[in-house]
Structure formats: C-alpha cells, structure tokens
Image (cartoon, helix red, strand yellow):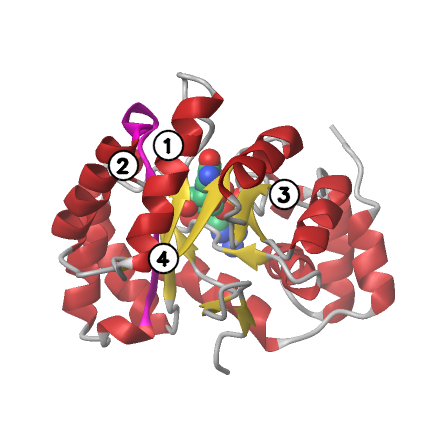
C-alpha cells in the first residue's frame, strides 16, 4: 500500500508517514535510511543538529530511489538564526545531503537570541522557497504567540508546525489553531520515545484489532491528519511501524487511545 499523503498550504503533497533519524549515529544512518526506503518509506526527517545529514544523502543514493520520490526534511541549527546564516546553513545541508533542494526546511526551535532573529531566519527561509532550494517551510517547537508573531511580522504562514504530540499529550488547542491558519501538524516523539508501546490502553486496543501497540498508536496519529515519522533501528521495527498505513481504527478505538492517561 502506498504511503498516504497530505496537501500542504503551498500546494505540495507530503507523505504522511516517514522515518525520523534523531539519535541515529552518523555511521549507521546510511544503512538505516536505505533499509527504510527499501521497505517502502518515502519520507526522512533529519536536522542539522542531528549530525547525520550526510548519512541520509548516502542512504538515498544507496537505495537507488529517485530523489523526486523521497521527501527530505531538515531543520535549521539554533546557532544560525540570522538571514545570511540561515541561507549558508541550508547550502551546507544541501552539500551534506548531496541534493539540490530539500522538501521541507524547519526552524528547529525559537532561537536563543529572541524573536527578531527568528523573523530574520524566517525571511531567509521564504527566500529559499522562492528560489526553489526549499519546497516548503515551517517551524518546530514554537508557542502559539511565537507562531503568530512570525506570521504578523512577515505575512508568511508556515506550511508545517512540528511539535511533540502523542495520545498522552495531544495539544488539541494548538492543533485547532493550526487548522484555522491552514498549518499542518507534524508529531515528533509519536510513540512518546517508545514508551507508549507498553501502555495498557495501547496493548488492549492492539489485541482487539490484531495489530501491535506501536501500530495502533501510529495509526492514531494518521487518523487525525497528523504527519508522523517514528524512529526505529531495526528492519523488523521499520516494517512493523510502516504497517500503521495498512489498516484503519474504529471511532471507538481512536477515542479509547485519545483517553490514554499516565499509568506509571
Ligand atoms: N523537532 C524536534 O525538536 C524533534 C525532537 C525529537 C524528535 N524529532 C523527530 O521526531 C522523530 C521521532 O521522535 P523520537 O525518535 O524522539 O521518538 P519516537 O519515534 O516516539 O520513539 C522512538 C523510540 O521508540 C522505539 N521504537 C520504535 N518503533 C518501535 C516499535 N515498533 N516497538 C517498540 N519500540 C519502538 C525506538 O527504538 P529503536 O530505535 O531501538 O528501534 C526508539 O527508542 C525523531 O527521530 C526526529 O526525526 C523532532
């Protein structure tokens, strides 16, 4: 089954499911990315601060999948929040990835130098989108007021906001704000860094529908229109997680997962 996709507010189609490579050691990244692409993944989420962009690019070349068939996201380093630094940082990412564009460039988090520097970086990202080196632009880990400030100062609405979302911390109010502004929400830490696979509610729903706990939690994200890219280190888990694209949950299942509470 093909990975589902969503259309962003700039008209670009993004694969709704992918692989995140946070904490993947640089020397292991190419093999993991190549294995994911061979398994059917078409979306990789990296960042300048992960130190593994070169491995992502190498994995893409090793897999032999055409560049245009794969969505690559990277994120601006916290130390590069000025106009010129952001442009230079993206150019360095393109060099490491071995590509002429990235599909999505995010401000990783509000910078240490305050909102003016975020606005300067954001203007640079809009320029990179205009000249084609970046297809879509967005932000990550912003508070609502920071998001609104960026838009008020520049008139440029992010296509994506990547935040920590999972059934235990669903951030409903911020996601509703995104919907009003036409911003897609990406879930980082979709399995709560792996911990939700042991949650009794995930286990119960998984047993009922004949899937694994990881699959039902990842499916919860997909059913709500979230974009998701769990990190996994083995071919077995890569396959298991991609299985979340192959079934649906009932309304009852989704409500049960949404009511997940702290259990330890
Ligand atoms: N914007 C940001 O600030 C930010 C922050 C954090 C993450 N992210 C992005 O979001 C991605 C995902 O988040 P994350 O990596 O922090 O957390 P996550 O995807 O929620 O969880 C990853 C953990 O879950 C385990 N896991 C994966 N599949 C599993 C399965 N089927 N069964 C049992 N355990 C499983 C992994 O173990 P193994 O690796 O051992 O298989 C790993 O320890 C990151 O890789 C990164 O791309 C962004």
Q: Residue furthest top?
A: 113
- Residue at 67% from the left image edge and 60% from the top image edge: 216
Q: Is residue 163 left or right of residue 180?
A: left
Crowding around mark 3 (Cα neighbors within 10 Å: few <14, some 14 to 19, many 20+) is: many
Residue at which label 2 appears: 86
Find residue 90 and report its horizontal and vertical position in percent.
23, 44
Residue 215 is inside the magenta segment? no
Using the image, tell me which numbered label, if any, was put on residue 165: 3
Closest to the observer: 238 or 186?
186
| Secondary element at image label 4 | strand
Q: Do tag 3 and tag 2 residues touch (Cβ < 8 Å)?
A: no
Quarter of the figure with the C terminus: top right
Q: From which residue to which does the magenta span run?
A: 70-82
Find residue 91 and report its horizontal and vertical position in percent.
17, 46
Which one is earlier in the sequence, the residue at label 3 or at label 1?
1
Vertical order, 103 against 42 (above or below)? above
Q: CA distance from mark 1 to mark 4?
A: 27 Å
Q: CA distance from mark 4 to mark 3?
A: 18 Å
Which one is earlier in the sequence, the residue at label 3 or at label 2?
2
Crowding around mark 4 (Cα neighbors within 10 Å: few <14, some 14 to 19, many 20+) is: many
């Amino acid at each position: 089954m093909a990975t589902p996709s969503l259309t962003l507010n700039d008209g670009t189609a993004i694969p709704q499911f992918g692989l995140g490579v946070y904490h993947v050691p640089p020397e292991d990244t190419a093999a993991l990315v190549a294995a994911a692409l061979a398994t059917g993944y078409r979306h990789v989420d990296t960042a300048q601060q992960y130190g593994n962009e070169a491995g992502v690019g190498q994995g893409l070349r090793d897999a032999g999948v055409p560049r245009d068939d794969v969505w690559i996201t990277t994120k601006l380093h916290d130390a590069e929040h000025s106009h010129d630094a952001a442009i230079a940082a993206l150019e360095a990412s393109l060099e490491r990835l071995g590509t002429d564009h990235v599909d999505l460039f995010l401000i990783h988090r509000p910078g240490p130098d305050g909102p003016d520097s975020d606005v300067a970086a954001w203007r640079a990202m809009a320029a990179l989108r205009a000249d084609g080196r970046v297809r879509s632009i967005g932000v990550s880990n912003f508070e609502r007021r920071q998001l609104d400030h960026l838009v008020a100062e520049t008139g440029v609405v992010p296509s994506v906001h990547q935040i920590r979302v999972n059934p235990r911390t669903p951030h409903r109010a911020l996601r509703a704000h995104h919907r009003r502004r036409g911003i897609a929400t990406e879930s980082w830490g979709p399995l709560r860094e792996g911990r939700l696979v042991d949650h009794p509610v995930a286990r119960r729903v998984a047993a009922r529908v004949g899937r694994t706990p990881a699959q039902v939690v990842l499916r919860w994200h997909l059913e709500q229109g979230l974009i998701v890219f769990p990190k996994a280190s083995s071919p077995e888990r890569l396959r298991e997680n991609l299985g979340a694209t192959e079934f649906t949950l009932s309304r009852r299942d989704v409500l049960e997962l949404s009511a997940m509470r702290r259990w330890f």
